[in-house]
Amino acid sequence: EVPSFDGIKLNVTRFHCRGGCNWNGKNHVMLLVHGFQVQQAMMWFNLPFFLPHGYDCVTFDLRTAGLSEGVGINTMGWNESKDVAEVCKWIRKEYGDDVVLGLYGQSMGSATIMTYCSKDPNLGFIIEDCGYASLQDTIHNIHDRFLKFVHRVQMGSLGDVFSADELSDFC
């Protein structure tokens, strides 16, 4: 477990590569960050891309996900980027300040690492996979679609109100 900035305990898993992660005189570590409404295990299918190539890998459950603590809403990358900062601090404590640290995020995990990366000039590299371009636009889109959905549901049952095509707009 790694404590975050507000005391929430983050559930962290570390995977060691067989040949060791120290090459060219430095340790090499990948931090893989999952997306919205899933947990760290969703990132484990990416381990074969990094472990055989000399990178130890670290995954963690974002706040309110999996085995990490936290209640309430996910902040779509805002507070989660602060969690990434704490896990990066932990990695540097474990592997040394000169570790070659790469970040890989998918979907909201991608947006989370992009929010964090501008605050850390010592990152080795970033892999941004399917992140959204604007948190503000994403929030407005979710808000507008959700309110439209709630209003329509309040007017009657789903079967009475929505056609199959209209329901697919919300999925």
Image: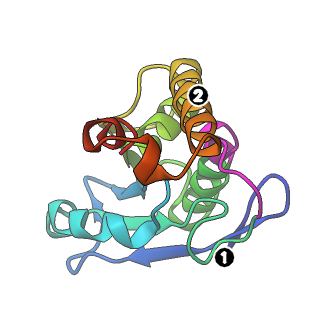
Residue 89 vertical position relative to residue 71 in the rendered view, above or below:
above
Q: Which residue is drawn at 66% across and 63% down?
A: 64
Spatial separation of the CA atoms under disc 1 and disc 2:
30 Å
Q: Which residue is drawn at 80% across and 52% down?
A: 5
**Position of residue 18 in the picture relative to residue 154 (left or right):** left
The C terminus, quarter of image? top left
**Please, what is the three-letter code of the amino acid marked with disc 2?**
Ile
Q: Which of 114 and 132 is in front in this view?
A: 132
Q: Which of 111 and 158 is in front in this view?
A: 158
Asked whether the residues under the numbered discs 1 and 2 touch, taking CB atoms below 8 Å apart as contact, a structural biologist would say no
Residue 11 vertical position relative to residue 146 in the rendered view, above or below:
below
Instruction: Please say whether residue 99 is visible from this viewpoint.
Output: no
Residue 6 vertical position relative to residue 140 in the rendered view, above or below:
below
Q: Nearer the viewer, residue 13 or 43?
A: 43
- Residue ID for mark 2: 139
**Please, what is the three-letter code of the amino acid marked with disc 1?**
Glu
Question: Magenta span covers which residues?
Answer: 71-82
**Position of residue 53 in the picture relative to residue 158 (left or right):** left
Q: Mark 1 or 2 closer to N-term? A: 1
Residue 149 percent across, percent down from the top left:
54, 38
- Residue ID for mark 1: 1
Q: Magenta stretch containing residue 158, yes or no?
A: no
Residue 42 percent across, percent down from the top left:
34, 67
